[in-house]
Amino acid sequence: SVYERIERLDGLLRAYITVRPREEVEAEVRQRVEKARRNGGLPLAGLLVAVKDVIHVKGLPVTCGSKMLGKYVAVYDATVVERLREAGAVVVGKTNMDEFAMGSTGETSAYGASRNPWSPDRVPGGSSSGTAVALAAGMATLGLGTDTGGSIRMPSAWTGLYGLKPTYGLVSRYGLVSYADSLEQIGPMARNTRDLAALLEAIAGFDPRDSTSLPGKPRGLVEAAEEGLKNGARGLRVAVVKEFMEHPGVHESVKKLVEAAARLLGDAGAEVGEARLGREVLEYSLPAYYVIAMAEASSNLARYDGVRYGPREPPQPWEGWNTYYSRIRAKYFGAEVKLRIMLGSWMLSSGYRDQYYIRALKMRRIVRDRVLALLEEYDLLLAPAVVAPPPRLGEVVDDPERMYALDLATVVANLSGVPAAAAPAGRVDGIPLGVQLIARPLGEDRLLRALGALEA
Ligand code: GLN
């Protein structure tokens, strides 16, 4: 069972920061299954969900992978958690993650790095590392992650899972601790397409408590996945993005898996071609992403000052407030978070703002326009999910340029606001590696159909 695996494996793999007591969870499962029986079925009746520890679940700690939140316990449920409950699911625990979702390997967590279950000396990918590990090792059935620049798709790709970043605004961010609001979305992770679709359908839809929430509620997502599983990808126009296949930063093994996925989709009835996004897209994406993400982070994380948020310590009689804030922030934030707050504040400061932040916004606009234009011609773009197999623990975490370079293929969708998903495509040295499909805004149904076709 899930709890036996947690007991046996989680000491080594570190998927969870908080696990709910078994009796409590089992009682809730019985309750939900009973309710499903009375209601003539619930879409996720009795399924156990692992929730990234940056999302509020009432009564459980929210750590964000940081020591900064101290012993904070959530006093309300995020909208997605409310919706999970209504759909019959049960939260089993809160999962490990890079601190405040800043990282690509899971190693910036203040609670120790998660390990890749397929090869424990390698990273599982981040920042939704714990959710991926929990699912891959059978320590939950469904999982929630967040994706600001790839944090759902990358760990999914490295642990053999399906993971989807929804269209910006499709899933409410109410109850999510913000890192870079204009880029991020909560999204589903699962071991198969059907579960992925069911989970997305449960959490998606308008929420008046999130001002960026889109109107309406998507329907037919499970049917779309099933259609793909049964009848393939007939009629879908898919373009392999050439720039990724030519890029020296993309590992040969990854290029081969993208080609294999293209053949599979072709065999499943899709019209598969090749297309270009234009030179600027790959050139601008990473710098634009990291400037915008750091700028927003520096503003969002300003609230952790040891007065309004964060651990309160007695101020020393000789120190002023600024010294107090600095002392608390120096003590409780990790190195990656500090680096980003400092760079972000600098890039927003007068004199540098035009040179960095404003230019990054212009680059973002160009990237988005190119992506949306190509998605007028094609239903889906096929690309790597991540440019290389997972590094060993400790290999890249202290080398920001190498760590950030791993995000080359994922940040494009966040800058553009479009939905994108990772799907397993094969193995390299026995470790899973995924590919990525990108769709136009609200194209989740087509995305899920293609994922179903790949899985079948
Ligand atoms: N690796 C990227 C970053 O560190 C993406 C993280 C994420 O999607 N949360 O910003």
Image: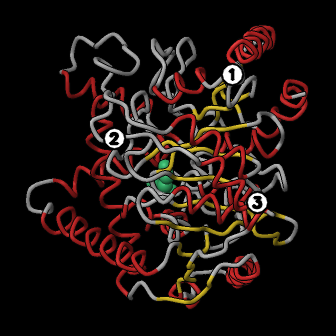
For the residues labelled 1 and 2, the Cα–Cα distance comes to 27 Å
Q: Nearer the viewer, residue 10 or 224?
A: 224
Q: Position of residue 159 (x, y in %)?
A: 75, 55
Number of numbered callouts drawn: 3
- Residue mark closest to the camera, 3 vs 1: 3
Quadrant occupied by the N terminus:
top right
Q: Which residue lies under the disc numbered 1?
A: 90
Mark 2: secondary structure: loop
Q: Is residue 315 left or right of residue 156?
A: left
- Residue at 91 percent of width and 30 percent of height: 8
Relative height, residue 237 to residue 404 (above, below)? below
Compared with 383, 225 (above or below) is above
Residue 347 can be seen in this image: yes
The image quadrant where one finds the C terminus is bottom right
Q: Position of residue 173 (x, y in %)?
A: 40, 36
Residue topped by disc 2: 215
Give the residue type at disc 2: Pro
Amino acid bearing label 1 = Val
Q: Is mark 3 within 8 Å of ligand 1?
A: no
Q: Amino acid at mark 3?
A: Leu
Question: Do callouts 2 and 3 mark residues in contact (Cβ within 8 Å)?
Answer: no
Q: Residue at x 43, y 68 (%)?
A: 412
Residue 77 percent location from the top left of the image: 48, 19
Q: Earlier in the sequence, mark 3 or mark 1?
A: 1
Residue 219 higher or lower than 9, as above or below: below
Mark nearer the N terminus (1 vs 2): 1
Q: Residue at x 80, y 13 (%)?
A: 26
User: In the drawing, does residue 334 fall left or right of residue 269?
Assistant: left
Q: Earlier in the sequence, mark 2 or mark 3?
A: 2
Q: Position of residue 435 (x, y in %)?
A: 66, 69
Label at residue 229: 3
